[in-house]
Image: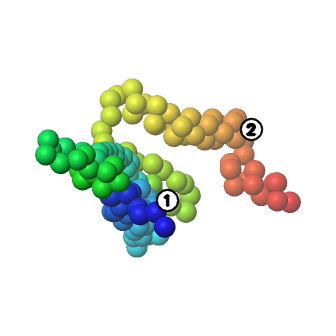
Amino acid sequence: MQQQHPIDNMMQTTMESIRGMVDVNTVVGAPVMDQKGTTIIPISKVSFGFVEGGGEYAVEDGKQKPVPTDIFPFAGGTGAGVSVQPVGFLVVTDKQVKMLPAQTTGAMERMVELLPQLIEELNAKDEKKKNKIFGKTDDELLDGELQ
């Protein structure tokens, strides 16, 4: 049986540590519910880096024979870094799902975020205007469709 190389042990230990730090609950947090039934889910961005290196060093002494290659001393190290940044909150109500960013953005990005809501409101006003032109309210139109 071949002996496991020390760098394999270092890699395994480091990856187990990273796996313990980063799981699905780190990216999508636990939902929180308020009294009105609104659910708020925190969303984060997780980044991590990993580096590992090592080598075996031969010891030669002028008085001794060279050391066999299978027993060279090993020197190595590993390093890892994890960054968790909040992205925003997913707000779920009975009528809509909305993403609220955690960080402030510029005016242009904010306009792009609000554009769907603006279009929806304009369409709703346009429908009300059409209904007034034809002399029927929304309720009367709905009653007419149900009959």
Choose between 58 and 29: the one closer to the eye: 58
Local SS, label 2: loop
> Looking at the image, which residue is at 56% across and 58% down?
95
Q: Quadrant of residue 133?
A: top right
Local SS, label 1: strand
Q: Is 147 displayed left or right of 85 in the figure? A: right
Q: Is 73 displayed left or right of 88 in the figure? A: left
Residue 24 appears in the figure: yes
Choose between 130 and 88: the one closer to the eye: 88
* Percent of width and height locating residue 84: 31, 51
Q: Nearer the viewer, mark 2 or mark 1?
A: 1
Picture quarter with the C terminus:
bottom right
Check the image and report above or below for 16 versus 44.
below
* Percent of width and height locating residue 66: 25, 46
* Percent of width and height locating residue 121: 55, 40
Q: Is 31 displayed left or right of 51 in the figure? A: right
Instruction: Give the mark nearer the N terminus: 2 vs 1.
Output: 1
Q: Quadrant of residue 124?
A: top right
Q: Residues within 10 Å of mark 1 (few under 14, many from 20)?
A: some
The kind of residue tagged 1 is Val
Check the image and report above or below for 129 versus 67.
above
Residue reaching furthest bottom? 35
> Looking at the image, which residue is at 35% across and 54% down?
70
Which mark identifies residue 92? 1
The residues tagged by marks 2 and 1 sit, at their Cα atoms, a distance apart of 36 Å
Choose between 34 and 27: the one closer to the eye: 27
Residue 84 appears in the figure: no
> Looking at the image, which residue is at 75% across and 50% down?
141
The kind of residue tagged 2 is Phe
Residue reaching furthest top? 108
| Callout 2–callout 1 Cβ contact below 8 Å | no
Residue under label 2: 134
